[in-house]
Amino acid sequence: MFKLPPNVTFESLKMELMQIPQTDLLRMAVALVLVAIAAYFHYNKKPKGSLNPEKFIDFKLVKKTQLSHNTAKFKFALPKPTSVLGLPVGQHIICRGIDSQGEEVIRPYTPVTLDSHVGYFELVVKMYPKGRMSHHFREMREGDYLPVQGPKGRLIYKPGQARAFGMLAGGSGITPMFQEELDAFAKKFPNQFKVYYVLNQPPFAWNGGSGFISKEIIQSHCPAPASDIQILRCGPPAMNKAMKAHLDALGYQSEMQFEF
Ligand SMILES: Cc1cc2nc3c(=O)[nH]c(=O)nc-3n(C[C@H](O)[C@H](O)[C@H](O)COP(=O)(O)OP(=O)(O)OC[C@H]3O[C@@H](n4cnc5c(N)ncnc54)[C@H](O)[C@@H]3O)c2cc1C
């Protein structure tokens, strides 16, 4: 609460103000408005992204966490603790590494973090025994730098662009669609988001699907073909091919399908 000093009354303050020439008062008012506008833009401006679509930029690996025998989470620092990566939803980055033969290799990856994660971004990478970029990630140690370029990708997501999305994600391709914790998301928005897992070798007690994603699974869990829906798919090449065949057979026209 604003309090006047004991020797100043509202009356005396009014008198003081009345003595200031009108032009000076106008200048003060204009200055105040300009300060308010500058403050508004300062506090509301969107932080600049840390990527460059034309150039590789090095990001420092600050933490590597092994999640399973062949999958690890890599946390990279952004230039400043206040920086954001600046990767739009649905887009990916490309990473450059060196394979086991000393040759340069470039592969796409999708961070599991969003721009609401400030100062860092994370990748979850599945490493294949003979994979070329897998070798690079396996060898990376905390303190090493990874050259990254982006944003990349043909999918430019605009809110409201589709009434409903169906997402068919498989293998390491699950990460483009993993940007939120799927189960927590399904719990929080039961009428807007549903998730159904299919394992080709499920454990004994398993209430999801088993085998590969079939036409019947797509029919039961994805929006039916319509001009205002989209089915996104991302997975190993063989899976993408099989999913395209299923979608074509079910009547999803090509403009209703998108492959990452
Ligand atoms: C948009 C997009 C986003 C992606 N995001 C992610 C992500 O976030 N995380 C992630 O883990 N992956 C992601 N991927 C997949 C990723 O780009 C790579 O394809 C993956 O990491 C494998 O690359 P690699 O160079 O290690 O394997 P590659 O060298 O390309 O090999 C691919 C496969 O072939 C096998 N292979 C390779 N050489 C041999 C050989 N001589 N003999 C037999 N088999 C062999 C490998 O074991 C592997 O199974 C994404 C892909 C796309 C398209």
Image (cartoon, grey):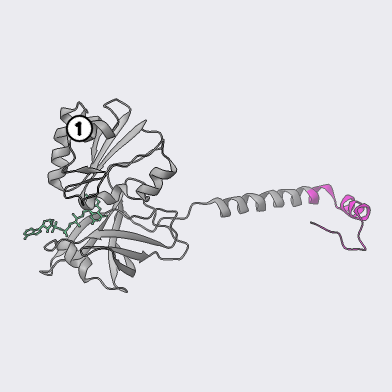
* The magenta stretch spans residue 6: yes
Q: What element carries label 1?
A: helix
Residue at position x 34%, y 55% from top? 112
Per the rendered image, the range of residues in magenta is: 2-25
16 relative to 57 in the view: left or right: right
Residue 206 x %, y %: 25, 47
Residue 133 x %, y %: 18, 62
Query: Vertically, is 242 above or below 91?
Result: above
Residue 60 lies in quadrant: bottom left
Q: List the residue tagged with mark 1.
A: 216
Query: Vertically, is 186 above or below 227?
Result: below
Query: Vertically, is 62 above or below 177?
Result: below
Residue 3 x %, y %: 84, 59
Residue at position x 34%, y 60% from top? 122
Q: Quadrant of the C terminus?
A: top left
Residue at position x 38%, y 43% from top? 186
Residue 116 x %, y %: 45, 54
* The magenta stretch spans residue 176: no
Residue 41 is at least partly visible in this image: yes
44 relative to 112 in the view: left or right: right
How many numbered marks appear?
A: 1
Residue at position x 30%, y 31% from top? 223
Residue 5 lies in quadrant: bottom right
Q: Work out whether residue 163 or residue 96 is closer to the camera in this orientation and state it.
A: 163
